[in-house]
Amino acid sequence: QVQLVESGGGWVQAGGSLRLSCTASRKIFSINYMNWYRQAPGNERDLVAGIDMSGTINYADSVKDRFTISRDNAKNTVYLQIDSLKPEDTAVYLCNARLYVRGRGWENYWGQGTQVTVSS
């Protein structure tokens, strides 16, 4: 199992920046994929950024110029830097760990989420 704890959300004015953190209960280099999703009220949960075991990074097209995902293996933490925040970035941001367990297949774990609110 993997426990994930997010932090760093808050209220910010448009144009500002936030850095979200997700700390895992196990070594993140042993987790196949560490992802950030977001979910706004009434919307589906959307993948915004992910980093895999090898360090390969992917972003949703809508955020690739403003979001930066990174990791600190020593701290078992993945970060999401969000710059030039827009009101439409308002959502709950959730950390996801996806790993393949021999004999059980793919497993997904979620944090509790951190709220980001951007005012215009």
Image (spheres, helix red, strand yellow):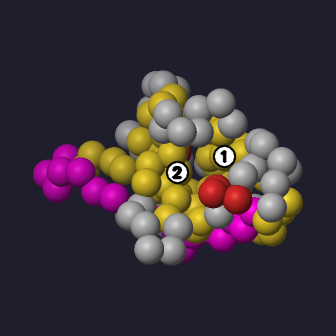
As displayed, is residue 31 above or below residue 65? below
Q: Earlier in the sequence, mark 2 or mark 1?
A: 2
Residue type beneath disc 2: Trp
Residue receiving disc 1: 80
* Magenta span of residues: 102-118
The location of residue 54, given as percent across then percent down, is 46, 25
Residue type beneath disc 1: Leu
Q: Quadrant of the C terminus?
A: bottom right
Residue at (72% x, 43% y) in the render: 81
**Crowd band around label 1 with a 10 angstrom C-alpha radius: few (<14), some (14–19), many (20+):** many
Residue receiving disc 2: 36
Query: Does the magenta segment cover residue 12?
Result: no
Circles 2 and 1: CB atoms closer than 8 Å: yes
Residue at (72% x, 67% y) in the render: 117
Residue at (81% x, 54% y) in the render: 14
Mark 2 residue element: strand
Give the main secondary structure, helix, strand or loop, of the magenta stretch.
strand
Residue at (66% x, 39% y) in the render: 67
**Crowd band around label 2 with a 10 angstrom C-alpha radius: few (<14), some (14–19), many (20+):** many
Mark 1 residue element: strand
Query: Does the magenta segment cover residue 112?
Result: yes
Judged left or right of residue 7, residue 103 is left
The location of residue 46, given as percent across then percent down, is 43, 54
| Residue 73 seen from this side | no
The location of residue 9, given as percent across then percent down, is 73, 65
Judged left or right of residue 15, residue 62 is left
Judged left or right of residue 14, residue 27 is left
* Marks 2 and 1, how far apart at CA: 8 Å
As displayed, is residue 81 above or below residue 10? above
